[in-house]
Image (cartoon, helix red, strand yellow):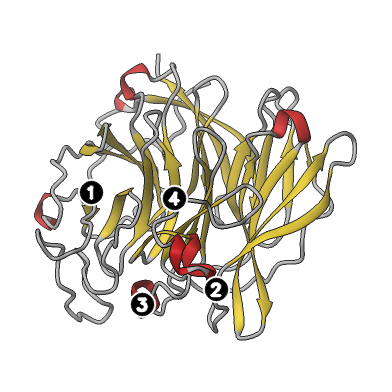
C-alpha cells in the first residue's frame, strides 16, 4: 500500500478547544495542504467503488462487509477475495432527495440468528418517512434477506425529501436500539414531543418503546423518545465507556457533536451556533437557556454525515476518539474524547465528500466516499 495522492495528500491539523457556542474557536478546513506525503498519517488502500453509498457494517466473526446504496441496493463484500454480490430481498424504497436506503447494522445476536437491521424511506399517508426493519441475512452464493419485518416508523409522515436521519446504534449491552430521526426540514416539530421528528428514540430490539424512557408515562410515540430538539442527526455511536454520541448537521454553520443523554432538549430550532439560511439569526447556545449545548460545534459547516468512535489497537493514541465523515468539508475529522468531554479536533483534508466511517475488525479505519467518487478506502498507520 502507499499514500493515495493527490486527492488524499492534503492534511490540515486544526487544534481547538471545545467551547459550546464559541464559533471563533471552531476549526475551518481552509486551503492549507501538507508539505509532503510524509505528513499524511495514513496509508490508504482503495479496495472498491460504489455508485451512491450511504452506510456500511462489518459482519461479526467474518469480516465480510455490508454496504448500502441510497438507490436501494445492498451489497455483501467478501473479506477474503474482495468479491461482492448484491443481496436479494431488500425492501422497496423511496429514492428522492436525501431519501432512499439508509443504515445497516448487524444485531447483537447476529452470530446466533443472522439478524440485521436496515433503515430506509417509504411512502404512506401524509407523505414520506423513515422506517427501520430487520431480517435474517442468508449468506452463500445468492445472499438474501428473509422474513423482513418493520419494527419502527418515523411519525408522522410529511411532504418533502430531506432530514430523515435514520442512523442506528445498539447499546453496549445489546438491549436497546437507538434510532436518530431528523426534523424533516420543518424545525418546530423538534420541540413537540407528541411526534418523533427531531428526536433520538430508544427502543427494544423488537421496536417497542424501551422501559424507563424519560417520557414513558405519556404513552404513544412519545414513549419512544430518548432526547429531542435535534435537526438532522446523521451519526450515532456509543463510545467504549457507554456514552452515546451523535453528530448533527446545523443550518448555515452550527454543525454539532452531541453527548446524548436521556430527557435532554438539544435546542433546535430555538438555539443553534449557526444561522438560518438566508442570514436569519438563531440564538446561540448559552448557559442557562434550558437546552443541552453541543460538546463541539463547527462554523463554517463541515456537514457531518457519519460518526465512528474508535476502539481498535492500530491507532493506539486515538482509542476512544470520535471520527466524523465531513461531506461539504471533504474531510475526515477526529475529535479527542475524554469521557463526556470533547476536546481538540484534527481535520484530515481528503478532497472528497466522506459519507461513512467505520472501524474494521483489525482496527483499520474504513471510509466510504459519497456519490461521484464512491471509493471504499482502508486506512492504516503510515510507516
Helix or strand or loop: what does disc 4 sit on?
strand
N-terminal of the two: label 3 or label 4?
Answer: 3
Q: Are marks 2 and 3 in contact (CB under 8 Å)?
A: no
- Residue 139's place in the image compared with 289, above or below, is above
N-terminal of the two: label 2 or label 4?
Answer: 2
**Label 1 – label 4 distance at C-alpha:** 14 Å
**Label 2 – label 3 distance at C-alpha:** 15 Å
* Residue furthest to the front: 217
Helix or strand or loop: what does disc 1 sit on?
strand
- Residue 229's place in the image compared with 207, above or below, is below
Q: Quarter of the image holding residue 239?
A: top left
N-terminal of the two: label 1 or label 2?
Answer: 2
Helix or strand or loop: what does disc 2 sit on?
loop
Sort mark 2 into few (<14), some (14-19) or many (20+) by Cα contacts within 10 Å.
some
**Label 2 – label 4 distance at C-alpha:** 20 Å
Counting from the top left corner in percent of width and height, residue 142 is at 89, 41
Sort mark 3 into few (<14), some (14-19) or many (20+) by Cα contacts within 10 Å.
some
Helix or strand or loop: what does disc 3 sit on?
loop
Counting from the top left corner in percent of width and height, residue 185 is at 42, 76
**Label 3 – label 4 distance at C-alpha:** 19 Å
Considering depth in this image, is 218 or 237 the residue closer to the camera?
Answer: 218
Residue at image mark 4? 235
Residue at image mark 3? 187
Residue at image mark 2? 155
Residue at image coords 38%, 38%:
323
Relative to residue 299, is residue 199 drawn left or right? right
Residue at image mark 1? 296
Amino acid at each position: 500500500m502507499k499514500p493515495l495522492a493527490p486527492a488524499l495528500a492534503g492534511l490540515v491539523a486544526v487544534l481547538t478547544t471545545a467551547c459550546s457556542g464559541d464559533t471563533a474557536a471552531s476549526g475551518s478546513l481552509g486551503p492549507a495542504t501538507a508539505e509532503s506525503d510524509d505528513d499524511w498519517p495514513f496509508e490508504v488502500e482503495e479496495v472498491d467503488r460504489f455508485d451512491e453509498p450511504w452506510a456500511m457494517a462489518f459482519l461479526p466473526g467474518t469480516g465480510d462487509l455490508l454496504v448500502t446504496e441510497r438507490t436501494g441496493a445492498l451489497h455483501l463484500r467478501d473479506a477474503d477475495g474482495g468479491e461482492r454480490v448484491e443481496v436479494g430481498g431488500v425492501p422497496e424504497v423511496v429514492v428522492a432527495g436525501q431519501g432512499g436506503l439508509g443504515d445497516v447494522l448487524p444485531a447483537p445476536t447476529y452470530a446466533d440468528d443472522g439478524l440485521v437491521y436496515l433503515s430506509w424511506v417509504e411512502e404512506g399517508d401524509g407523505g414520506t418517512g423513515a422506517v427501520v426493519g430487520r431480517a435474517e441475512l442468508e449468506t452463500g452464493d445468492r445472499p438474501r434477506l428473509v422474513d423482513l419485518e418493520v419494527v419502527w416508523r418515523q411519525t408522522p409522515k410529511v411532504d418533502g425529501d430531506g432530514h430523515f436521519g435514520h442512523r442506528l446504534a445498539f447499546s453496549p449491552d445489546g438491549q436497546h436500539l437507538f434510532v436518530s430521526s431528523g426534523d424533516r426540514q420543518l424545525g418546530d416539530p423538534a420541540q413537540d414531543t407528541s411526534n418523533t421528528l427531531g428526536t433520538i428514540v430508544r427502543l427494544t430490539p423488537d421496536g417497542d418503546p424501551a422501559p424507563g424512557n424519560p417520557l414513558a408515562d405519556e404513552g404513544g410515540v412519545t414513549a419512544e423518545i430518548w432526547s429531542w430538539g435535534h435537526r438532522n442527526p446523521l451519526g450515532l455511536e456509543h463510545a467504549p465507556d457507554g456514552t452515546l454520541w451523535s453528530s448533527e448537521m446545523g443550518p448555515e454553520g452550527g454543525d454539532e457533536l452531541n453527548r446524548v443523554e436521556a430527557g435532554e432538549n438539544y435546542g433546535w430550532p430555538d438555539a443553534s451556533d449557526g444561522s438560518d439560511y438566508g442570514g436569519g439569526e438563531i440564538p446561540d447556545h448559552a448557559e442557562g437557556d434550558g437546552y443541552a449545548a453541543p460538546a463541539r460545534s463547527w462554523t463554517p459547516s463541515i456537514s457531518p454525515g457519519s460518526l465512528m468512535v474508535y476502539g481498535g489497537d492500530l491507532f493506539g493514541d486515538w482509542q476512544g476518539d470520535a471520527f466524523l465523515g465531513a461531506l461539504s468539508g471533504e474531510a475526515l475529522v477526529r475529535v479527542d474524547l475524554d469521557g463526556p468531554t470533547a476536546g481538540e479536533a484534527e481535520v484530515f483534508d481528503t478532497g472528497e465528500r466522506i459519507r461513512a466511517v467505520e472501524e474494521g475488525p483489525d482496527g483499520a479505519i474504513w471510509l466510504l466516499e459519497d456519490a461521484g467518487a464512491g471509493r471504499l478506502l482502508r486506512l492504516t498507520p503510515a510507516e
